[in-house]
Image (cartoon, grey):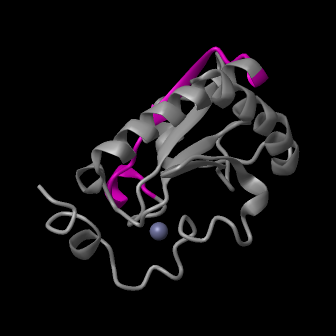
């Protein structure tokens, strides 16, 4: 299936000017952890846990069906880096990695695909609470970004 047949034209609204994932270098630039070729990694503005981040394709596409092979490869490559970076920075007991497609599934941004990675610790609440809700924790986001950014850069250099 070609991108034209099942991509931007069909799945994306014509107006994406209000899409927070299409304007990552504006007001949310401080939250960006790593910029790849086709995708980037950004902290969630309303984190469930410290280190809650998202892997996002640059293109305004709503679901996995709309991705091309290169985007899928990079989404997974950056999810791998994110897993490693979170492990190094926070030593979580576990990590949730997931995609919410559609409002009933808990998606906060409906039309721009993103993969959540949420560090988890023994004793915090269930996965269903993770995908449906947010809560703010003490560590401020600029501090989190400053902590994770150099780890991403180093891991990406090693991953060649
Ligand atoms: Zn978008």
Relative horizontal placement of residue 38, taking residue 149 as reference (left or right): left
Q: Residue at position x 60%, y 31% from top?
A: 82
Q: Quadrant of the N terminus?
A: bottom left
Relative horizontal placement of residue 139, taking residue 69 as reference (left or right): right
Q: Quadrant of residue 45?
A: bottom right
In this view, which residue lies farthest toward the front? Answer: 160
Expressed as whole percent of the image width and height from the top left, the position of residue 160 reads 57, 24
Q: Is residue 71 visible?
A: yes
Expressed as whole percent of the image width and height from the top left, the position of residue 129 reads 51, 39
Expressed as whole percent of the image width and height from the top left, the position of residue 31 reads 74, 54
Q: Closest to the observer: 14 or 74?
A: 74
Expressed as whole percent of the image width and height from the top left, the position of residue 156 reads 64, 30
- Residue extent of the magenta highlight: 89-107
Relative horizontal placement of residue 90, taking residue 67 as reference (left or right): right
Q: Residue at position x 39%, y 48% from top?
A: 100
Does residue 91 belong to the magenta stretch? Answer: yes
Q: Is residue 138 visible?
A: no
Does residue 68 belong to the magenta stretch? Answer: no
């Amino acid at each position: 299936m070609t991108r034209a047949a099942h991509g931007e034209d069909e799945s994306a609204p014509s107006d994406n000017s209000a899409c927070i994932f299409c304007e990552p270098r504006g007001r949310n630039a401080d939250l960006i952890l790593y910029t790849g070729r086709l995708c980037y990694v950004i902290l969630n503005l309303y984190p469930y846990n410290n280190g809650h981040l998202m892997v996002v394709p640059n293109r305004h596409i709503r679901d996995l069906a709309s991705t091309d092979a290169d985007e899928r490869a990079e989404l997974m490559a950056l999810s791998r880096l994110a897993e490693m970076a979170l492990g190094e920075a926070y030593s979580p007991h576990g990590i949730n990695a997931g995609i919410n497609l559609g409002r009933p599934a808990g998606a906060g941004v409906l039309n721009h695909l993103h993969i959540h990675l949420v560090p988890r610790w023994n004793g915090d609440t269930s996965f269903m609470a993770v995908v449906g809700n947010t809560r703010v924790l003490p560590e401020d986001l600029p501090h989190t970004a400053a902590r994770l950014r150099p780890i991403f850069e180093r891991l990406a250099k090693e991953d060649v």
